[in-house]
Image (cartoon, helix red, strand yellow):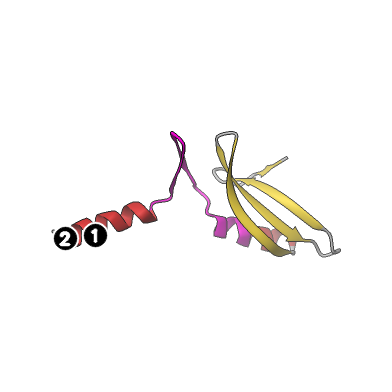
């Protein structure tokens, strides 16, 4: 029984649900998946990556160094994978 409880608690901790106040936000695309897509699509170096809650939506914010030496921030919707302006 203890093994079942430990496994259940581990599943809860590893669950991709993020609790923000009273809202429950489900991330379809992980930060790692989006980061890999950005690297291959933009041919750039990722300097930082984090996930934020903006307007009730989970957004991945990726800081990149472009091939011409500029720093850019990309905001990508975690559900759709589309760029947010």
Label 1 with label 2: CB-CB less than 8 Å: yes
Task: Give the position of the C terminus as an image quadrant.
Answer: top right
Q: Determine whether the residue tagged by mark 2 lies in a helix, strand or loop.
A: helix
Q: Is residue 41 left or right of residue 71?
A: left
Q: Which mark is residue 6?
A: 1
Report the residue marked by disc 2. 2
Q: At x 53% / y 51%, what residue is drawn?
A: 29
The residue at the point 60 percent across, 55 percent down is: 34
Question: Where is 40 relative to 75, above or below?
Answer: below
Q: Residue at x 67, y 46 (%)?
A: 75
Circle 1 crowding by C-alpha within 10 Å: few under 14, some 14–19, many from 20: few
Residue 26 lies in the magenta-colored region: yes
Q: Residue at x 13, y 58 (%)?
A: 1
Image location (x, y in percent) of residue 69? 84, 64
Q: Position of residue 55 (x, y in %)?
A: 60, 34
Between marks 1 and 2, how big is the CA–CA gap? 6 Å
Magenta residues? 15-37
């Amino acid at each position: 029984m203890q093994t079942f409880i430990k496994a259940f608690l581990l599943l809860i901790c590893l669950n991709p649900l993020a609790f923000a106040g009273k809202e429950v936000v489900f991330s379809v695309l992980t930060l790692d998946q989006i980061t890999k897509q950005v690297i291959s699509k933009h041919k750039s170096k990722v300097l930082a990556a984090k996930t934020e809650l903006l307007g009730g939506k989970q957004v991945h914010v990726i800081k990149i160094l472009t091939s011409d030496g500029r720093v850019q921030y990309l905001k990508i919707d975690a559900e759709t994978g589309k760029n947010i302006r």
